[in-house]
Image (spheres, grey):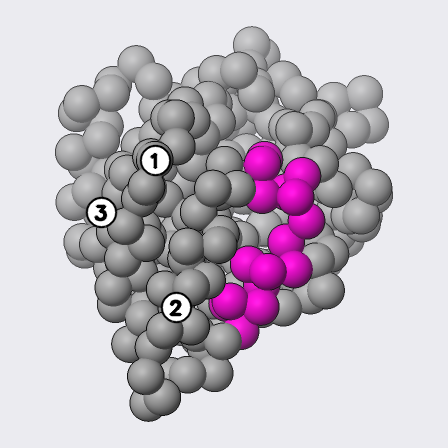
Amino acid sequence: MSNVPREDLLPRPSGGRFVVGAKPITEAEWLPPDAAMLRERTMVRSAHPCEVFACMDGWGAAVAEVFDALPHDTPDDVCILGKVDNRWVLVGGELCFPNRWVLQEKIGLPVLDVHGPGPTYASHVGAGVDSLIDRLADGRIVERSNWSISDSGEYFEPRTPPPIPDVNPANLLLRVERQTLRQMGGVVVFTIRTYMEPMSRFYNRPREQVDAFVQVLRETPAEVRAYKSISTYVDPLCAYLTSCSPH
């Protein structure tokens, strides 16, 4: 397990609203190497060879061109969006670290429908995300982060397991995805780098970082907690994190 390497990737309070929070990054910042994550990807590819890759009919050449252009030691998951009937659609990708979604089931869906189960996605940011993707034509690369709680520590988790009763909050993990978007040759490349930090380590972070995450947990709406499958974990996790002695 690897700690979240940058404070700006950690969850920040937003009043319970879903925000895109995308910011521009440079080419040099786009896909930094990570030997440990690359080893993890290699193991997942070997264990799940038929489940990590998918491609929409008619898009094989465009998808292959993207993967040929990327560094061979890329530690990120890569999803590729193409324009179909004037909508951005998921046309292919390699997903070794799915966070409770199945790549093959999402192929061919518009971006808004890929995120459809998210209870606040469409109403809060759906149109904004589509507009952001359209604006990538000027060559910019943008980055954002997303968070969830893992109770298994599994990087490859396409299906949602049942919650663990009477879980020890110290055994839970903060799962953070560093996500980037970039246009390449008429398609958009969406990358996901996954970090999982045990709560027993997060507990020892600076007080302001721990307090900020507790606030995030408390302000997360009930429907979003259910979507993230963390409803039963929020209260015990908040109690655990607020039991920290001041640093």
Looking at the image, is 225 positioned above or below residue 135? above
Of badges 1 and 3, nearer the viewer stands 1
Estimate how packed mark 2 is, as few (under 14), some (14 to 19) or many (20 or more) residues with alpha carbons within 10 Å: many
Residue underneath mark 2: 241
Segment tinted magenta in the rendering: 212-227
Of badges 3 and 2, nearer the viewer stands 2
- Residue 241 placement: quadrant: bottom left
Q: Amino acid at mark 1?
A: Pro
Evaluate whether residue 75 shows in this view: no
Of badges 2 and 1, nearer the viewer stands 1
**Mark 2 element type:** helix
Residue underneath mark 1: 165
Q: Is residue 159 magenta?
A: no
Residue at point 16%, 33% (across, down): 43
Estimate how packed mark 3 is, as few (under 14), some (14 to 19) or many (20 or more) residues with alpha carbons within 10 Å: some
Q: Amino acid at mark 2?
A: Leu
Q: Amino acid at mark 3?
A: Leu
Residue underneath mark 3: 38
Quadrant where the image shows the C terminus: bottom left
Residue at point 34%, 77% (across, down): 244
Mark 2 vs mark 1, CA separation in Å: 19 Å
Mark 3 vs mark 2, CA separation in Å: 31 Å
Q: Earlier in the sequence, mark 3 or mark 2?
A: 3
